[in-house]
Image: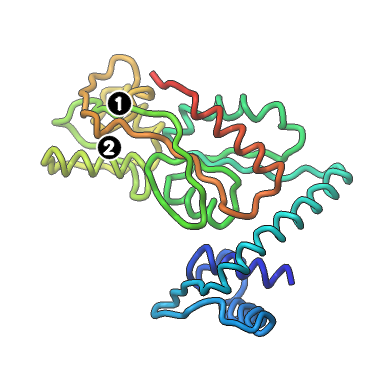
Amino acid sequence: MFALLETLIAVYETGQFTMAADELKVSQSTVSSRIAALESTVGAPLFDRHAKSNVTPTEAGTLLYRAAIDIGASWRDVREQIARAQANREPFSMLFSHTAGALLVPSALRAALPEAGRFEMSVAPMNSDGILEKVGMKEAQLGVVEKPIINDSVERVTLCEDELVLAGDPDGVWLVREHGSGVRYYTELYFKTAGVMPNHVIEVASNASIVASLAAGVGCSVVSRAACPDGVPTRNLGPEFVRRFYALTPRSGLTRDQRVLADMIVAALRDIRLQ
């Protein structure tokens, strides 16, 4: 029954049988058969099927989803208690977009240290779109991104402000992040609002490499003022380039202790004032 309810949650949150299958790492036919079994058990359709594999929940589907969330939380709490009794530690994976990682990881680790002995913790960099995918698939317990992305499978909390500036010589080569990164989103916004059509662009999939290049006098880029090296000329871009970082957590699937730790870290990151 737990497998059936987990499948219902995945379909409800992703809106597709195909994406639910990817999240659960099973075939689409398995997802379909599990949903059919649930529909047979409750005696009502749980989803309305549409074109391109999209589905929307029926009233019965919504009611069962809410119950499944509660059942899943109780089940995870019991497993958590058993794990603690056996001295096992729960995983807690944190993913940070590149600029957020450079600026916020120390504060996140400081907030997590009191609970570090109870978890297998890890921290890794990734661009914002990749973080959304990992958190939405419950492969990470907390993500911090640089653009206001929205997805039904995650909860989003607004964190601290971060001012972006134009750093380096704008007549030189442009160093830009890869598609899917938060800074790339704002770089393209700058190109559009300023009417800029750069002649020379190099895509660099590392914020640290861009910052190091700027420090060496190579190129120009839109970067966080807080991450800009000393001595590099900067130009203010205006209030529309004062962005915020955002914390993402899975809408379902966290144990009680994972949720408490995520909330502790998010609270600490909301209080930061970047210079």
The residue under the point 18% across, 26% down is 169
Q: Nearer the viewer, residue 186 or 155?
A: 155
Answer whether labels 1 and 2 touch (C-beta < 8 Å).
yes
Q: Nearer the viewer, residue 151 or 124?
A: 151
Q: Nearer the viewer, residue 70 or 51?
A: 70
Residue 271 x/y as whole percent? 49, 24
Residue 264 x/y as whole percent? 62, 32
Mark 1 surroundings: few (<14), some (14-19) or many (≥20) residues within 10 A: many
| In the image: residue 102, left or right of residue 40 | left
Q: Is residue 47 visible?
A: yes
Residue receiving disc 1: 214
The residue under the point 35% across, 20% down is 229
Give the farthest residue toward the top.
Answer: 231
Residue receiving disc 2: 175
The residue under the point 56% across, 53% down is 251
* Residue 165 figure quarter: top left
- Residues at marks 1 and 2, CA–CA distance in whole angstroms: 9 Å
Report the amino acid beneath label 2.
Leu
Quick one: SS at disc 1?
A: helix
Residue 215 x/y as whole percent? 32, 22
Quick one: SS at disc 2?
A: strand
Residue 195 x/y as whole percent? 11, 41
